[in-house]
Image (tube, rainbow, N blue to C red):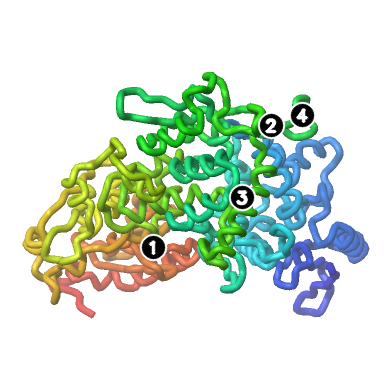
Amino acid sequence: MASVHSRKNKAGEITSYQVKWRLGGGREAPVQTERFDDEPSAEVFKDAVNEHQQQWPPGWVKGKGYIDLSAAVEETSYIFRNYAREVIKNKTGVEERYRRDCYRELEMYLEPTFGNCDVRSAEHFSKRTVAAWVIKMGQTYVWRGSKRKLMSPKTLKNLHGLLSSVLRDAMEAEPPLRDRNPCKSMRLPRTDDDGAADDERSEDAEFLTPDEVAGIVSCFTRAEDRVLVRVTYGTGMRWGEVTALARRHARTPVAGEYELRVVRAWKRRPKDHEQPGAYLGTPKSVASRRTVDISAGLWQELVDHGLEEMAPAALIFHNGKGERLVYSTFYDRWVAAVTEAKEQGLVPEWKYPTFHDLRHSHVAALLSAGHSPKYVQQRLGHESIKTTMDKYGHLLKEAHTGALGTIDRALGIDGPSGFEVAEEEHEARRPVEAPGRSLFVAHLGTTKVGFWDVAHAEETAERWARERAGSVRVEKVTAEWWIRSTPVQQRGSENGLKRVRHSVPARAYIWQVGPAVYAADGTELLEPGAHEVRGGWVWEFEPLYTEEPAHHTAEWKPGARTEARAWGPDREAVEAAYATARGDALRTCGLHPERAVDGREVTA
């Protein structure tokens, strides 16, 4: 609850009154304060804070009071609940369902804490207040099906992203409403670890083996359901995509090649829309509009399903009447098949696969066989390869066969796929088991980084090119070449092979500031932008990479100059370290070896 505290000077005289409370009323929430010259005004404000559940009263501007009526419309537009809704309303390139989801998340999770806050205020939205909200959300229980569980890290990440987008909009407004976004570079709980107990169902993807998929398929009583599941597993399509396929989308561009064209997906309009219900719209993203190659074996299954007798506009998978196959009706049959597969011992009891897990399992079949992440990205319809790698990068192993051959084996189809991959490709993509054989070098500008797996080299090179531009390439080399190219002082006991990586290198968002440059007499030699904090992604093989909050240096440089700089992943720690570095530089610049006094060097 808010409370009033008197403020006294050294003589013990009351000079002002301060209202104090914790934002939102949480025990660990940030403390908020407002100053008043008289006690009655403070009491009135205290009551207003309590009335609004420990939030700043609507229309109140810190240090100014309630806004006057003439400015009311303009000022209230900066209140978070109003500003955020306007930001979402004006987002372009998004669907109405996305807006509805954002409005719901605002109302449920953001507005209870920030609803009456001013987006311009550095006190209302600071690193401390946002961190307190993140902690609060991490302790919030939400409904998952019929159970209440702690909010998952993925949900928290999405909410944090929504808050960040609103504050970023305030920064980019004309003129800017804020100097910085406190959400930027804030550490969140890992999305791959939500702390679920071993006996609880995980919210992560459930990867099914080919035998487990076959087991589930065998438990369906309807032939059309079996084909639907196998085609979904064989293509990695989403439910809304595979059930929107028409006969005209199944094509054979040349003899021996088969493909399914994804150009639409089932969507749903809200009940209050003038035409509510399901409709055929565009897929999830631009990248989702794609062509998915399939093998001759999977094509034959579609032919056996009656593909060639269908009209061009006819749905391949439907409700038996040629109409949309509603997921809720199929869901019951899916659950029944999974349950039966478990009872027969075809699927482990601890697995709870959803239909969408067929898409995840499709990726697992490809990546675990070592096929290119770029190929998988395009096949799935991901906008960015980062999405593919973040979700499925841990599945990368070695390559043995062509991508479609892999899917054929996963489906148990015999015979040629029509898309065999040359043996040279398999050899090039196979990780080196004996270090003396070969490896892959990513040339990143002037930097060379070695990898045992070509997929890791390609992913690193692609990210580098996207972020830094410039020339990049990946080449296969012998271990002997790598040893010869490694400086003697860096070879160590394993002749430099220890520096060859088994995974994509880590990255960190590093803030840096400086250098501040001082002459030997302490005069600061100003460099444009030297004192501005700037940030960017840094790879672990680069000198600035660190996991410590901050580092700083004060070093002598040629020309009797002393330079101070600081860097690290924690911006506030970097700024503090920079102040320390500048102090060190000022203390030591007068001792620079190149400074001469009476013809003699000054020494410590």
Front residue (pair 207, 89): 207
Q: Regarding mark 4 in the picture, which secondary structure is present there?
A: loop
Task: Categorize mark 2 by other alpha carbons within 10 Å: few (<14), some (14-19), many (20+).
Answer: few
For the point 64% across and 53% down, the residue is: 335
| Label 1 to label 2: alpha-carbon separation | 52 Å
| Label 3 to label 1: alpha-carbon separation | 53 Å
Q: Is residue 150 left or right of residue 303?
A: right
Of badges 4 and 3, the one in the foreground is: 3
Mark 4 = which residue? 273
Q: Which mark is residue 334?
A: 3
| Mark closer to the chain start, 1 or 4 | 4
Amino acid on which disc 3 is placed: Trp
Total residue callouts? 4
Amino acid on which disc 1 is placed: Trp
Q: Is residue 165 left or right of residue 415?
A: right
Spot occupied by residue 532 in the image (x, y as percentages of width and height): 43, 53
Res. 524 image quadrant? bottom left
Q: Quadrant of the C terminus?
A: bottom left
Circles 3 and 1: CB atoms closer than 8 Å:
no
Residue 261 can be seen, yes or no? yes
Task: Categorize mark 1 by other alpha carbons within 10 Å: few (<14), some (14-19), many (20+).
Answer: many
| Mark closer to the chain start, 3 or 1 | 3
Mark 1 = which residue? 567
Task: Categorize mark 3 by other alpha carbons within 10 Å: few (<14), some (14-19), many (20+).
Answer: many
| Label 4 to label 3: alpha-carbon separation | 31 Å
Q: Which mark is residue 49?
A: none
Of badges 1 and 4, the one in the foreground is: 4
Q: Regarding mark 1 in the picture, which secondary structure is present there?
A: strand
| Label 2 to label 4: alpha-carbon separation | 11 Å
Res. 98 image quadrant? top right
| Label 1 to label 4: alpha-carbon separation | 52 Å
